[in-house]
C-alpha cells in the first residue's frame, strides 16, 4: 500500500451514481472508535480500495463524482485545493478528518 504518504481510491458505480471513496492509505484496515460505547467503524478495502492513486487521478474522479466519501487529512487537503470542499465543509470521524460530498443536479 502507499504507506503514510499516499492515498487510495475506489470508484463505485451504483445505478446512475458515480461514487468516489478515497482515504489516506494508512487508514485502510483500521477500526475507528465511535463514541465511548465500544462501537467502531471499519475502514475497509472493499469500500475505499487498496490501489494507491495520484493527486491527478483523485481530482479527475472528484470532478465526475455524484457522491464522494473522503477520509484523512491528505485526501481532504487535495479536495480543498481542487475546490470540492470548503473550510467549513468537513467534520471528523473518530478524530480523523472526514467529508461527504453530494452533487445536486437540477
Image: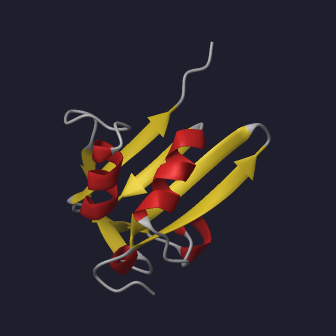
- Residue reaching furthest to the top: 106
Residue 48, visible in the rendered structure: yes
Residue 70 at what x, y percent from top left?
Answer: 41, 53
Which one is nearer the viewer's eye here, 57 or 23? 57
**45 left or right of 96?**
right
Residue 94 at what x, y percent from top left?
Answer: 25, 60
**45 left or right of 81?**
right
- At horizontal 35% and vertical 47% (from top left) the residue drawn is 79
**1 left or right of 91?**
right
Q: How many marks?
A: 0
- Residue reaching furthest to the front: 56
Which one is nearer the viewer's eye here, 87 or 94? 87
Residue 41: quarter of image: bottom left
- At horizontal 29% and vertical 44% (from top left) the residue drawn is 80
Residue 106 at what x, y percent from top left?
Answer: 63, 12
Residue 65, visible in the rendered structure: no
Residue 62 at what x, y percent from top left?
Answer: 51, 46
What quarter of the picture does the N terminus occupy? bottom left
Which one is nearer the viewer's eye here, 57 or 26? 57
Image height of 14 relative to 58, above or below: above
**15 left or right of 8?**
right
- At horizontal 49% and vertical 71% (from top left) the residue drawn is 53
- At horizontal 34% and vertical 36% (from top left) the residue drawn is 83
Its colouring scheme is: secondary structure
Amino acid at each position: 500500500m502507499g504507506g503514510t504518504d499516499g492515498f487510495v481510491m475506489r470508484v463505485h458505480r451504483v445505478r446512475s451514481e458515480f461514487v468516489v471513496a478515497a482515504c489516506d492509505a494508512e487508514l485502510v484496515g483500521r477500526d475507528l472508535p465511535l463514541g465511548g460505547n465500544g462501537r467502531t467503524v471499519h475502514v475497509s478495502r472493499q469500500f475505499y480500495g487498496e490501489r494507491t492513486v495520484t493527486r491527478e487521478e483523485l481530482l479527475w474522479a472528484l470532478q465526475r463524482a455524484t457522491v464522494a466519501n473522503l477520509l484523512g487529512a491528505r485526501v481532504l487537503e487535495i479536495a480543498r485545493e481542487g475546490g470540492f470542499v470548503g473550510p467549513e465543509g468537513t467534520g471528523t470521524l473518530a478524530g480523523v478528518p472526514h467529508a461527504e460530498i453530494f452533487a445536486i443536479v437540477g
